[in-house]
């Protein structure tokens, strides 16, 4: 065997070790992201912003790791680099085992972002940053170990890194979360980190023994022309767009379903997949195909984005496709601009900086400057400028498509402003009404605009112009809820709107959180203090309040979740109500008579507020004080699962009087919470009944009731005696699902059960 053959044979295990090390570090990094966010989530009420802020933090930690790897290249000796990196790995291990560090103090509802960033920094910042440094550092070692004949092979290791990240992300919701408790997850990850230190030590020893420590085989960075600042800024922009869109589409998805790891990982997994494809030597999706599909996806997405009433099963693939193809387009453009491997760590540093810029814009800047989630469509529109610009000659066909696209988009707000009021005011007669015709016309205009945008895709500026106007036109056409005001905080977007309900004397003002109605109030003085929708007297919540009022002249009431404060309508002169609310903005809006007046004009007894996560603040309340404790935090699409665990319900029961009643309002469009709640009730030692309330036509028009699922729990059978013989309530079945605990929740299973129920409308729940 020749000397060359022996050298190649010895090189193969080293090359495999490079890939294994990069793969393992990436897997650890992306296993810990949803794990830590899930650990923190209960402290901040289950808000989707927890994930966005966490992801922005992880991007900053990634940048720190890449900056550290770049700075480490100033040491010419690989032996010195290996020793220093080993010391950094060991020093970061001092914060293990993985846990939420209490050094920062209790959660803050007034400054949740700062508290979350502080907790993440002291809990996982160091291990995450030093693990993140592995990919660029190992690729730099690879570039110095192998000869010039390998070309730019170290960049292929970045695909291996993202493959490890992708598999870890998919493993978390599908394998890790459903099968392991949080305690086991924390210990398992900590053990994996220690095992990685040994793996990294083996690679470093292999590299040093191979003789690469004597000096670089490839060109030194000084021998390569410096990178122009314009090129660096282009790298930043191309990396920032996918990062911002990832957080934008994540906010959209998690607001409409739930803030949970199994949904967080969808956009992030697609984001990583774009890196895998883009950094392959032969990409599975050529760039020309990417540009074609991206133009079609963005045009469709811009046309349907504001129509939130569309079926989620239709919206989800449209938004994910637009995001995936746009991210792939940007990352393929980055790969096309990658520098010589001698500048490899610098390239990754600036690319990581772009990720931080995009993520920080969504997590920290947008919630301050926008009163709605405008950053998602805004960045989607501006991403069109990342397409190839083409030449400046515009032929007649392109001019025609530009005019058609703009005209179709502009026509929709005109129709909505001047035609819609007359159409919707007329009664519906026959099968295909004028309203149907009007809506079809709007869709035709938007569709024509989207097609025109696609046909001018080869010219970036024209494509951008049509998509921008199309987005504005679609938003105007979709606004049929008459939104009068909106506010935004860390915990989400509040929208106030009005609608006409003749049975309630005309206008009814509503408050929505994201896409979920959180209460309504009639403006007519005759109906102003009537509890509406979920709180109407005919609903399960209303039934419990009326039953307790018949037996007791004075009630002590606790309510988790404020909304419009509708529960205040039940407060009599001798009663006292305490709201437990995490969002200061909700308290401010519900207490302003210019918006809602349940708490200020309808409650006849005192109403007070406790700010903070209800699980934590309720724990400080005295035992055995509540006649009624209402947990009304689950109808929101971002479900705070920590409020529906065995430990949580056990704690609620300790605050009830012997004959007190706990109400769990479980209405949710996308998740079946009835099964876990019934199982939790028994596991917590309570006695429970369930009701699936569906109002009949003409029933209680004065309360404008809505469908409602509720479970009531008492400490003993005597506590539910007044409901036991009421045919509307029936015994629970605690065997329909595994009870949720602080260590185990399964939102993915709840989603599947709800989908199954929708396919079988005859099934209850």
Image: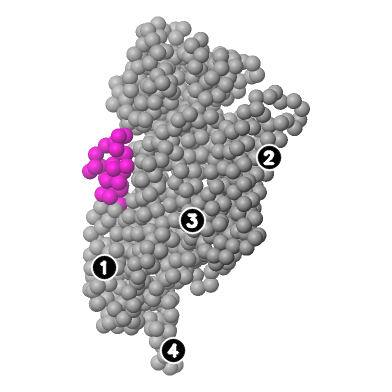
Camera-side residue: 171 or 255? 255
**2 or 3: tag closer to the N-terminus:** 3
Distance from Cα at disc 1 to Cα at disc 2:
60 Å
Quick check: 467 left or right of 166? right
Judging by the rendered image, the residue that carries numbered circle 4 is: 5
Residue drawn 62% across and 28% down?
421
Q: Residue furthest right?
A: 430
The colour scheme of the drawn protein is one colour
Give left or right: position of 37 versus 390: left
Q: Nearer the viewer, mark 2 or mark 4?
A: 2
Query: Which stretch is magenta?
Result: 99-124
Residue highlighted by disc 2 = 441
The residue that disc 1 covers is 71
Q: Residue extending furthest bottom?
A: 2
Tell me if mark 4 has few (under 14), some (14-19) or many (20+) residues whose alpha carbon lies within 10 angstroms of its own: few
Count of residue discs: 4
């Amino acid at each position: 065997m020749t000397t060359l053959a022996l050298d190649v044979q010895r090189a193969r295990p080293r090359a495999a070790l490079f890939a294994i090390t990069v793969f393992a570090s990436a897997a650890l990094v992306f296993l810990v992201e949803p794990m830590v966010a899930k650990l923190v989530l209960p402290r901040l009420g289950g808000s989707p912003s927890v994930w966005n802020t966490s992801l922005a933090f992880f991007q900053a930690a990634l940048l720190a790791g890449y900056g550290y790897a770049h700075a480490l290249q100033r040491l010419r000796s690989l032996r010195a680099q290996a020793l220093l990196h080993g010391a950094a790995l060991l020093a970061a291990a001092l914060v293990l085992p993985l846990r939420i560090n209490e050094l920062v103090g209790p959660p803050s509802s007034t400054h949740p972002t700062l508290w979350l960033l502080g907790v993440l920094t002291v809990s996982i910042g160091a291990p995450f940053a030093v693990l993140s440094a592995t990919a660029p550092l190992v690729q730099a070692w690879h570039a110095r170990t192998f000869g010039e004949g390998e070309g730019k092979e170290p960049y292929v290791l970045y695909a291996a890194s993202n493959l490890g990240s992708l598999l870890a992300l998919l493993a978390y919701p599908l394998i890790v979360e459903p099968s392991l408790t949080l305690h086991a997850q924390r210990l398992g990850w900590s053990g994996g980190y220690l095992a990685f230190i040994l793996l990294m030590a083996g690679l470093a020893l292999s590299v040093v023994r191979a003789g690469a420590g004597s000096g670089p085989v490839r060109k030194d960075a000084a021998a390569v022309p410096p990178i122009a600042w314009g090129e660096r800024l282009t790298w930043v922009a191309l990396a920032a767009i996918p990062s911002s869109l990832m957080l934008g589409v994540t906010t959209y998805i998690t607001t409409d379903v739930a803030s949970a790891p199994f949904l967080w990982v969808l956009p992030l997994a697609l984001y990583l997949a774009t890196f895998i494809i883009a950094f392959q030597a032969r990409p599975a999706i050529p760039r020309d195909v990417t540009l074609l599909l991206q133009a079609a996806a963005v045009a469709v997405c811009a046309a349907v984005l504001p129509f939130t009433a569309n079926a989620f099963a239709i919206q989800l693939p449209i938004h994910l496709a637009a995001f995936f193809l746009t991210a792939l387009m940007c990352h393929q453009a980055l790969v096309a601009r990658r520098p010589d491997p001698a500048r490899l760590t610098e390239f990754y540093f600036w690319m990581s900086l772009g990720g931080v810029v995009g993520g920080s814009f969504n997590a920290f800047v947008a919630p301050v400057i926008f009163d709605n989630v405008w950053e998602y469509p805004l960045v989607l529109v501006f991403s069109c400028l990342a397409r190839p610009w083409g030449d400046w000659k515009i032929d007649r066909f392109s001019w025609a498509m530009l005019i058609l696209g703009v005209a179709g988009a502009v026509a929709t707000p005109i129709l909505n402003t001047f035609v819609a009021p007359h159409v919707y005011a007329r009664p519906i007669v026959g099968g295909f009404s004028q309203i149907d015709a009007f809506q079809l016309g709007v869709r035709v205009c938007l569709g024509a605009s989207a097609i025109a945008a696609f046909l001018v895709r080869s010219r970036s500026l024209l494509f951008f112009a049509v998509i921008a106007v199309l987005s504005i036109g679609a938003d105007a056409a979709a606004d049929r809820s008459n939104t009068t005001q909106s506010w935004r905080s860390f915990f989400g977007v509040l929208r106030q709107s009005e609608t006409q309900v003749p049975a309630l004397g005309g206008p009814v003002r509503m408050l929505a959180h994201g896409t979920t109605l959180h209460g309504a109030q009639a403006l007519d003085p005759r109906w102003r203090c009537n509890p509406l929708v979920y709180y109407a007297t005919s609903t399960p919540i209303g039934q419990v309040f009326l039953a307790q009022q018949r037996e007791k002249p004075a009630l002590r009431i606790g309510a988790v979740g404020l909304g419009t404060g509708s529960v205040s309508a039940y407060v009599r002169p001798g009663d006292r109500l305490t709201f437990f609310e995490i969002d200061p903005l909700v308290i401010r809006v519900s207490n302003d008579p210019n918006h809602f007046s349940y708490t200020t004009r309808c409650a006849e007894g005192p109403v007070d507020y406790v700010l903070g996560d209800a699980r934590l603040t309720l724990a400080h309340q005295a035992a055995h004080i509540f006649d009624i404790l209402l947990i009304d935090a689950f109808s929101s699409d971002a479900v705070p699962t920590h409020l529906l665990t065995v430990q949580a319900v056990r704690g609620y029961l300790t605050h009830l009087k012997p004959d007190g009643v706990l109400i769990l309002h479980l209405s949710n469009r996308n998740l079946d919470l009835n099964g876990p709640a019934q199982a939790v009730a028994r596991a917590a030692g309570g006695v429970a009944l369930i009701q699936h309330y569906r109002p009949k036509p003409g029933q209680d028009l004065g309360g404008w009731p809505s469908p409602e699922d509720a479970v009531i729990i008492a400490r003993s059978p005597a506590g539910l005696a007044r409901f036991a013989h009421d045919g509307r309530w029936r015994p629970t079945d605690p065997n329909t699902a595994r009870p949720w605990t602080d260590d185990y929740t399964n939102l993915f299973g709840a989603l599947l059960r709800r989908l199954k129920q929708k396919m079988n409308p005859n099934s209850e729940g």
